[in-house]
Image (cartoon, grey):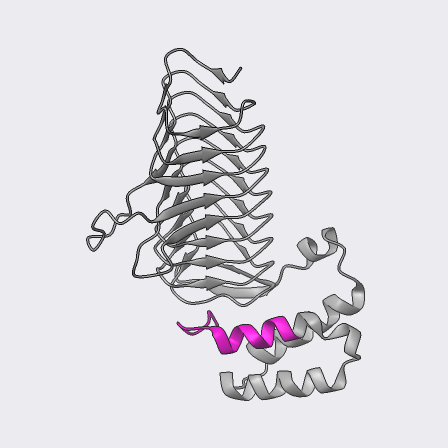
Amino acid sequence: MMLIHPTALVDASAKLDSSVEVGAYSIIGPNVSIDAGTKIGPHVVIEGHTTIGRNNTLYQFSSIGAAPQDKKYAGEPTRLEIGNNNVIREFCTFNLGTVQDNGVTRLGNDNWIMAYVHLAHDCQVGNNVIFANNAALAGHVHVGDWVILGGFTNIHQFCKVGPHAMCGMGTSLLQDVPPFVMLNGNPAAAHGINVEGLKRRGFSREQISAIRQSYKLIYKSGLTLEEAKQALDQQLADLPVDETANVHLMRDFLDAASRGIVR
């Protein structure tokens, strides 16, 4: 028997695993699917074509799957997809995607999302991220795995944040952030690589050294971005093959950056 509080309103067409818990006064719409072990707190609204995976915890007063804050949205059946093992704290707002993009907003697995976080339409967020209170992502933002956003971080639409990057409190991002970079400020400025985070995740001394060298080529050498790309290509040629993956990640990111990078 599903653990649904008698004051909750769950549409008969919603698909909830029998182990899902739904708190008092929460509302779940007809196109919602929620998998095993997920707990929905009180006063949560889940609507739209929303899929929520296993073992998530959603705290009170969050709005999940509401229409995009986009004037072009015309009621199309776009989606929100939330993976497994996420903690989503109070007053979060996650919106559906739009047909102007791929039509889906995604949050991956094992993420820690603190209070008042906003995921706008078409955001793509990876795994193992930490978003502190009041972090806000505008539309079409892409965030890689293991990223940390400090409280009140704001990210401009269409920006990309590479894996393992870390933003300090109050950071304002108007451009893309390469992997591993640590930054802060308004406007944001780079301040080295996230060494402590990499150590905690098991990166070797050699791997961190290669990443640090790549950072210096991009940020400390006085090279233009195109010259830095060429220097990274040379670094890759000089490294043992089994130590190139992280440098490739940084090099490929520079080619994919569509708004320029924070420098």
Tell me: 123 left or right of 165: left
Residue closest to the eye, 8 or 132: 8
Q: Is residue 37 above or below residue 222?
A: above
Residue at the image point whose x is 62% and y is 76% from the top: 216
Q: In this view, does 68 lie above or below 19?
A: below
Does residue 244 show up?
yes
**Residue 155 location in percent, x, y?**
39, 56
Query: What is the magenta range?
Result: 248-263
Q: In this view, does 121 lie above or below 176?
A: above
Residue closest to the eye, 56 or 14: 14
Q: How many numbered marks appear?
A: 0
Is residue 262 rendered magenta in the image?
A: yes
Residue closest to the eye, 109 or 236: 109
**Residue 77 location in percent, x, y?**
30, 47
Q: In this view, does 23 lie above or below 241?
A: above
Tell me: 214 left or right of 65: right
- Residue furthest out toward the top: 6
Could you say which quadrant of the image residue 84 lies in?
top right
Tell me: 100 left or right of 18: left
Does residue 224 show up?
no
Could you say which quadrant of the image residue 6 lies in?
top left
**Residue 238 location in percent, x, y?**
75, 86
Residue at the image point whose x is 62% and y is 71% from the top: 249
Could you say which quadrant of the image residue 11 lies in?
top left
**Residue 48 location in percent, x, y?**
33, 39
Is residue 150 rendered magenta in the image?
A: no
